[in-house]
Image (spheres, grey):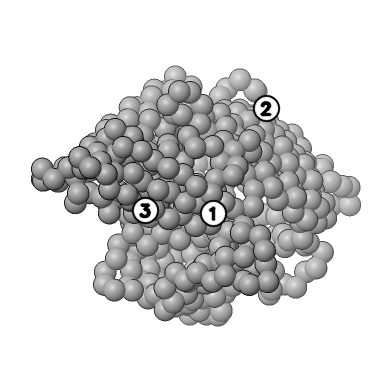
Amino acid sequence: MTKAIHILMVCLLLGHTLESLAREPMPFSDDKLIVNEVLIEGNKITKDFVILRELVFSIGDTILKMELLPFIQRSKENLLNLALFNFVSFDVSHLPGNRIIFHIEVTERWYIWPIPILEYADRNFSEFIKNKDWEKINYGAWLRWNNFRGRNELLTAKIKLGYIKEYALAYTVPNLGKRQRHGLTTGFNMKQQNEIIIATVHNKPEEYRPQEVPAMTRLNAFMGYQFRRKLYGTHSLKFEYYDYEVSDSVAVVNPNYLGDGNTHLNYFYLSYAFNYDIRDSKVYPLEGFRVSMKAEQVGLGIIHDFGNPAFRFVGILMYHQKLANRVYFYNTTKGRYSSGKYMPYILNRALGYNENLSGYEPYVMDGSDYFISKYNIKFQIIKPTDYTIPFIGMKQFNKIHYALYFNMFADVGYVNNLFPNPTNTMINNWQYSAGAGFDFVTYYDQVFRIDFAINRYGEYGFFFHIETPFSRW
């Protein structure tokens, strides 16, 4: 426990160091402008201070003329990355004495979403299309109140029934303090399933439905603190409690599901994360980079039911670059190291769940450590385009944007498992794939993907995804 705390402190200091080193180079010029005023229009709900917090300049700042356009572009990207506005535009008025006024106009999104839930419960959309298992449908209601009170707060509540039952409530306040540097989040969720993935056999998830239901109940309660000193670096500390309970037959079929034949598992979880994100978009980035690292302690030694405390470290690097007109490159790399090599099955998931290798959608790979890297060249077929739907009167919906990209990609990954099931031949071996596809990007953060991919075993096919691809990383 003491060792884990020391490692968490080292990660915290490293995060502060990375943030302090990430400085923009200073241009050389003596042609200066003074920001006299910032005028904001269109924010009927959003408070001015939320918008002003994301600007790379402040009232009274002196900026160089050569910085003006880059500052406007970066500030626009920052505002769009809040996911509060569909459109943002800037204009500049010049006053005597080299003084300027910034005019900012925003088109706010619709923030209150009492959404009926009707969704598939498979790991990905391609698997749902392949299996056509209509029992794996979730339904219910989900309230997502973005920009609650106009302060960029988030309130969510969920009641989901069907294949997976879920009840959840969470509240996030991101802009506390005079300088809006602090944030808090708290909430809980409970999940209940009659059918679960009980094991991985022949590299595929094996489902099990016991006669006694529910098969599994999971309770999670959490609270977190975030610190964002400037614009792009965020430090996060999170404390969670997990409680799992499974039916007796689950523990018989797979004694390691919760470990040691247990039907009950509970533990505390502590994590520190540092994230530095200077991409032009968090939904579908084309330029910029993101560096993220997380130190996790799974099990704090407080509760004796959990006999396998483990320290985990997760690192992510995303790099996006424009190569030529309408041609872009990106690489996304993620790795996880765990000190605990023998973990309960429920805590030992690696690739095939949140992180997927293209062309491996039917498969999952479990293990304590993993590495995944994706390489992609994008060709912009349709540039980001705006279109106003004439018969819709509400500004939140009548103006949409869309873009279309053709991709060529290659993926590589590796999962380390010291206690493998002999039938799972994909672990402890390098896996790779390649292919091509199309991404259709539209408003409210929706990306529709269709890919053709082939993996190292010569298996190939078309795969469909409906997601915000970078959010799960």
Give, as a three-letter code, the residue at label 2: Asp
Of residues 65 and 147, the one drawn nearer to the viewer in this rendering: 65
Q: Give me the C-alpha separation between circle 3 and circle 1.
A: 15 Å
Query: As drawn, is 178 to the left or to the right of 23?
Result: right
Q: Element at badge 3?
A: strand
**Residue corresponding to mark 3:** 91
Q: Residue furthest front?
A: 96
Q: Residue at x 46, y 44 (%)?
A: 40
- Decide: few, some or many residues near mark 1? Use Cα within 10 Å; few <14, some 14-19, many ≥20: some
Instruction: Check disc 3: other Cα within 10 Å, few if <14, some if 14-19, many if 20+.
Output: few
Mark 3 and 1 residues: CB-CB less than 8 Å, in contact?
Answer: no
Secondary structure found at label 2: loop
**Residue 36 can be seen, yes or no:** yes
Identify the image quadrant of residue 224.
top right
Is the residue marked by circle 2 packed among few (<14), some (14-19), or many (20+) residues within 10 Å?
Answer: some
Amino acid on which disc 3 is placed? Asp
Q: Which residue is mark 2?
A: 305
Among the two numbered marks 2 and 3 on one chain, the one whose residue lies closer to the N terminus: 3
Q: Amino acid at mark 1?
A: Thr
**Closer to the eye: label 3 or 1:** 3
Q: Is residue 160 above or below residue 343?
A: below
Between 31 and 291, the one lying in front of the other is: 31
Which residue is label 1 attached to?
107
Question: Of tags 2 and 1, which is closer to the observer?
Answer: 1
Between the C-alphas of marks 2 and 3, the distance is: 61 Å
Residue at 37% in and 76% down: 379
Is 406 situated above or below 222?
A: below
Q: What SS does tag 1 mark?
A: strand
Name the residue: 44% across, 69% down: 384
Nearer the observer: mark 2 or 3; the answer is 3
Q: Residue furthest right?
A: 211
Residue depicted at x 47% and y 71%: 385
